[in-house]
Image: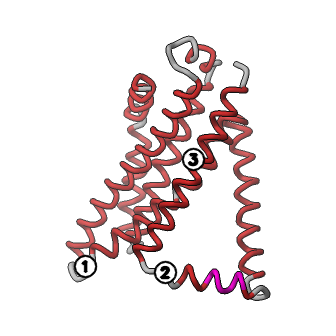
Amino acid sequence: MRGMLVKDFRLLLMQKQFFVVIVAVSVFMIASGQNTSFIVTYCTAMGMFFSVSSIAYDEFENGYAFLFTLPVSRRGYVAEKYLFGILCTGITWLLSVVCCGIYEQIVRPASDPAEQVLITAISGLVLFVPLAVMIPFRLKFGADRGRIVMMIVTALLFGLIFLVAKAADSFPVLKQAVRAVNGLSGPALSGVAFVFAVLAMGISAFVSIHIVEKKQF
């Protein structure tokens, strides 16, 4: 697994233009007065998307057939992809929180840093859910078809959320559930987000291992 991590991080270091674009867009958003919590979410999402894109590099020119001639098990490969995704997402979240936190304290010293960290922590944890969804789809369908399937799934999820929001007015149980979530304190909400992210990643890893073990290369 360590060798695979080194490979992916070396690939990460080769994408300097990718990070220059992220920094440039973040600076532009700060200059335009965009909320720093949104900027943290944006940077974290970019780190997440890059970690998933590493799967496409492994597929290139029948790369899987070569990778599995090395001392890398299929379970180990899947575990490394999840670890790499967690590290990329977590590192980009931490760096963006530190930079945006320094900016907030310089420009708005009266703002509460603990509250800002809590808000960005919740948004960062929520982003592990799309990571958990994207990895098995990429492993199953590949880069091109996986992207199309993900667009369809995303559209269906937004449609489902819209229907649930509309149905909440008609069903008292759903309305009470929404009120209960809205009434949670910041630490409690972050705890719920953490548990949900861990469950999503655990289920996703189980599915991904099954996909890779059954796949023919």
Q: x, y percentage for residue 207?
A: 67, 40
The type of residue carrying mark 1 is Arg
- Distance from disc 2 to disc 3, alpha carbons, whole Å, reads 25 Å
Q: Secondary structure at mark 3?
A: helix
Residue 202 badge: 3
| SS at circle 1 | loop
Q: Residues within 10 Å of mark 1 (few under 14, many from 20)?
A: few
Q: Main secondary structure of the magenta part?
A: helix
Disc 2 target residue: 184
- Left or right position of 21 against 95: right
Range of magenta residues: 173-178
N-terminal of the two: label 3 or label 1? Answer: 1
Q: Position of residue 137 (x, y in %)?
A: 68, 42
Of the image marks 2 and 3, the number of the one nearer the N terminus:
2
Q: Residue at x 67, y 26 (%)?
A: 213
Task: Work out how far the residue at label 3 is from the one at label 1, CA to CA, in angstroms.
Answer: 39 Å
Q: Seen in the image, is 32 located left or right of residue 159? A: left
Report the residue marked by disc 1: 108
Please name whichever residue, 5 or 195, is drawn nearer the observer in this view of the structure.
195
Name the kind of residue labelled 3 in the image.
Gly
Say which quadrant the N terminus sits in: top left
Q: Quadrant of residue 27?
A: bottom left
Q: How far across and down, in percent of the image, does residue 216 sit?
A: 73, 21
> Does the CB distance between marks 3 and 1 fall below 8 Å?
no
